[in-house]
Image (cartoon, helix red, strand yellow):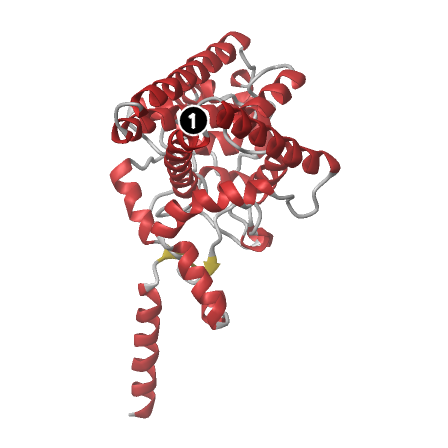
Amino acid sequence: MFTNSPVGSPSADKRTYQSIMSRHQKPSSKRAIWQIINSIVPYLGLVVLMYLALQVSFWLTLGLAVPTAGFLIRIFIIFHDCGHRSFFKSRKANHIWGVITGVITFTPFYAWRQRHAVHHATSGDLDRRGVGDVWTMTVKEYLEAPLRKKIEYRIYRNPLAMHFLGPIQILLIQNRRFPPKATKRDRNSVIGTNLAILGIILLASLTVGIKAYALIQLPIYLIGTAAGIWLFYVQHQYEGVYWERHESWDFISASLDGSSFYRLPKVLQWFSGNIGFHHIHHLDSRIPNYHLEKCHDEIVVFRPIGSINFWRSLKSLNFRLWDEEGSKLVGFGHLRSLKRKQRERVLISQE
């Protein structure tokens, strides 16, 4: 277990941190435009190449879907930054490109932005779970839940279901309907994105054919979204993560100890738009993805922060529940341990 809180700064508040990080908040139009070019152009080029490969072999097309999905993730990071109004200096430019990249990633911009804002405001708060996060029950909640809810939760937390059925659920259900308490703009965002996607499908059916479109687009989406779910999962579900009840919840701790520093190989860091520096992002979401690494490297108080690598992150697959007594994530095996201890206490009391 480790803590991400910088040495010598336990009393620093949100304003103090954001003050020292402020020089990294300024968006760069040059870098933003270049990121759009080096993300969307290769993505579209690979889609065309996948179509040509389909004339040879579906397996060749499927192989090309992997790097294409990588560019889809990178496009989603642009979408994500536009949602935080950090990608461009212009509010209008952020909204325009947020909508465009939202159509490419099949995600309604305004509706998603609202849910994601809630996530940033409540991450690590046990009393404000449920919007824009991974469903996480405490041990006590799980033990007291009815059988049906326990079954639903076990299915949800199963890695195969989460990373293979999850993308289908997001594509067909979550992103296609209005979120709870949706504003008019949120509803229009969902409707507009759905109509745009329908238009793309109709155009594809009239040109390359609906079968070819499905054989190209579905693998890209499913691979890209599965990888995206994993990135989001490991950002807040890892050994030593911070969770607290609302009265004890602290923004700085939730950002630095409740969001991982996921150190990926450089090529994966590039495709994921530096989102591995998630602790920096949660501490100040106004910093564009293309400044996150520099912010982390240049500010002294961030240097002692611990990181997790890919192999260590795989341990997160075992986590299922939050143990409030131990202040840690545990697997379902922890429940067997509790039952065993309970039986031992009963036997001791009977002696």
Position of residue 166 in the picture relative to residue 182 (left or right): left
Instruction: Give the residue at mark 1.
Output: 72
Residue at 31 percent of width and 37 percent of height:
308
Q: Is residue 250 visible?
A: no
User: Quadrant location of residue 251?
Assistant: top right
Q: Amino acid at mark 1?
A: Leu
Q: In the image as oriented, which residue stretches furthest toward the bottom?
A: 351
The relative height of residue 134 versus residue 65 in the rendered view (above or below) is below
How many callouts does the rendering have? 1
User: Quadrant location of residue 100?
Assistant: top right
Residue at 58 percent of width and 24 percent of height:
98
Residue at 46 percent of width and 18 percent of height:
291
Q: Residues within 10 Å of mark 1 (few under 14, many from 20)?
A: many
User: Quadrant location of residue 270?
Assistant: top left
Where residue 351 sits in the image (x, y, percent)?
28, 92
The relative height of residue 37 versus residue 297 in the rendered view (above or below) is above
Where residue 127 sits in the image (x, y, percent)?
58, 55
Q: Residue 7 versus residue 308: which sits nearer the camera?
A: 308
The relative height of residue 326 versus residue 233 in the rendered view (above or below) is below
The relative height of residue 110 versus residue 324 in the rendered view (above or below) is above
Where residue 15 sits in the image (x, y, percent)?
60, 30
Position of residue 87 in the picture relative to residue 55 (left or right): right
Position of residue 290 in the picture relative to residue 126 (left or right): left
Where residue 23 sits in the image (x, y, percent)?
54, 16
Q: Residue 276 versus residue 41: which sits nearer the camera?
A: 41
Q: Dot 1 lies on which element?
A: helix
Q: Residue 212 versus residue 183: which sits nearer the camera?
A: 212
Q: In the image as oriented, which residue stretches furthest toward the right?
A: 184
Q: Is residue 51 visible?
A: yes
